């Protein structure tokens, strides 16, 4: 048994930002409309782009969304090869989750996998101690077999006398899981169309970040993939090394063309990869992609076709052969 545990044990390295670590069981508590789903999806995309995990090793269970919201997120998931599951879709039902995790732990296929449940109350009654303990056992077995589990959960509507958030449910989840975070809106700048949220670690058994701040755009009528691209870590007090918003456009265009030429074709993957290589913000990259997209090769650098779930797949225009290229002198 000791040898098996040692072989399956994942190093306690950051997987989702510096919040949830590889190989642990984690829970994020937040009030409604905080952006917890948006932020965790952005962190998953970043982890896939950085090579910390393969998209096909991520299983995101979305049990708390409308059909419209689900469709928008599926488009992002498909771009990165993420397994995006919802009750009643593709023959998936919530009662299959725990048996699937138990089977993965049993047959040694849990190692390197990430399971995210949004939200946790859909698979276990957080007010029922027995249900919480049983689910905790399944998540722990999955973790001991080398998997990583993150559950998203709600906070109570009422705050503590000191205005602190209070997690919903019994203490069993908090006691059984390795790390836990409270996500609290830290401010909303209407002039900048952005919201800032603060992660506070209320439990950790490893080197998890104790505090972190993230921001994202609240601009109206922004498509979900575009809003996702605005998520970034920040610090409202000390600032951060911000991504370069104003990199020379010709260099950004060249980086985009290189990425497309290398076979990365969907918009979100192009933006994520160019950001990784250049430190240009994903929003800026997306603006450049849009500005240079179109059917005319004399005006535009690339064009796209719609593929499954409405994703845009890009191709470079073939450059016209000039007289100079025919000149052999």
Image (cartoon, rainbow, N blue to C red):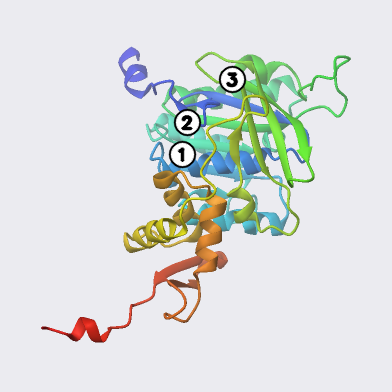
Q: Rounded to the nearest whole Å, what is the CA distance between mark 3 and mark 2?
A: 13 Å
Foreground tag (3 vs 2): 2
Mark 3 or 1, nearer chain start: 1
Left or right: where does residue 31 sit relative to residue 319? Answer: right
Expressed as whole percent of the image width and height from the top left, the position of residue 315 reads 40, 70
Q: Nearer the viewer, residue 119 or 248?
A: 248
What residue is shown with label 3?
A: 179
Q: Which is nearer the N-term, disc 3 or disc 2?
A: 2
Answer few, some or many: residues within 10 Å of disc 3's Cα (few below 14, many 20 plus, some between 14 and 19): many
Judging from the image, what secondary structure is the residue with disc 1 in? Answer: helix
Based on the displayed image, in which of its 4 quarters is residue 222 positioned? Answer: bottom right
Label 2: few (<14), some (14–19) or many (≥20) C-alpha neighbours in 10 Å:
many
According to the image, label 1 marks what residue? 47
Lower sequence index among marks 2 and 1: 2
Residue 26 is situated, as x and y percent measured from the top left of the image, at 58, 25
Rendering coords of residue 215 (x, y %): 66, 38
User: Which residue is the site of mark 2?
Assistant: 15
Question: Mark 3 or mark 1, which is nearer to you?
Answer: 1
Residue at horizontal 67 percent and vertical 29 percent from the top: 236
Disc 2 + disc 1, Cβ < 8 Å: yes
Residue drawn at x 51%, y 61% is 288
């Amino acid at each position: 048994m000791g040898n098996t545990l040692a072989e399956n044990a994942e190093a306690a390295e950051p997987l989702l930002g510096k919040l949830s670590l590889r190989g642990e069981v984690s829970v994020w508590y937040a009030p409604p409309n905080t952006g917890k789903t948006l932020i965790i999806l952005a962190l998953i995309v970043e982890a896939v782009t950085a090579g910390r995990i393969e998209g096909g090793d991520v299983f995101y269970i979305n049990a708390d969304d409308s059909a419209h919201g689900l469709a928008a997120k599926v488009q992002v998931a498909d771009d990165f090869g993420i397994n995006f599951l919802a009750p009643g879709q593709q023959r998936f039902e919530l009662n299959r989750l725990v048996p699937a995790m138990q089977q993965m732990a049993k047959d040694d296929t849990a190692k390197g996998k990430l399971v995210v449940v949004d939200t946790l109350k859909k698979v276990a009654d957080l007010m029922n101690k027995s249900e919480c303990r049983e689910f905790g056992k399944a998540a722990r077995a999955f973790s001991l077999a080398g998997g990583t589990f993150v559950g998203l959960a709600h906070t109570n509507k009422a705050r503590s006398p000191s205005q602190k958030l209070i997690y919903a449910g019994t203490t069993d989840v908090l006691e059984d899981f390795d790390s836990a975070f409270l996500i609290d809106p830290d401010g909303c700048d209407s002039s900048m169309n952005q919201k800032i949220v603060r992660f506070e670690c209320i439990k950790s058994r490893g080197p998890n970040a104790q505090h972190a701040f993230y921001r994202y755009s609240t601009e109206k009528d922004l498509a979900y993939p575009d809003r996702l691209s605005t998520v970034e870590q920040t610090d409202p007090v000390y600032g951060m090394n911000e991504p370069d918003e104003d990199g020379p456009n010709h260099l950004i265009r060249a980086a985009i063309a290189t990425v497309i030429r290398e076979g990365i074709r969907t918009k979100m993957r192009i933006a994520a990869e160019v950001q990784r290589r250049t430190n240009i913000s994903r929003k800026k990259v997306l603006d450049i992609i849009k500005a240079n997209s179109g059917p005319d090769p004399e005006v535009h650098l690339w064009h796209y076709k719609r593929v499954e779930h409405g994703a845009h797949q890009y191709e470079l225009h073939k450059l016209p052969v000039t007289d100079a290229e025919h000149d052999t002198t």
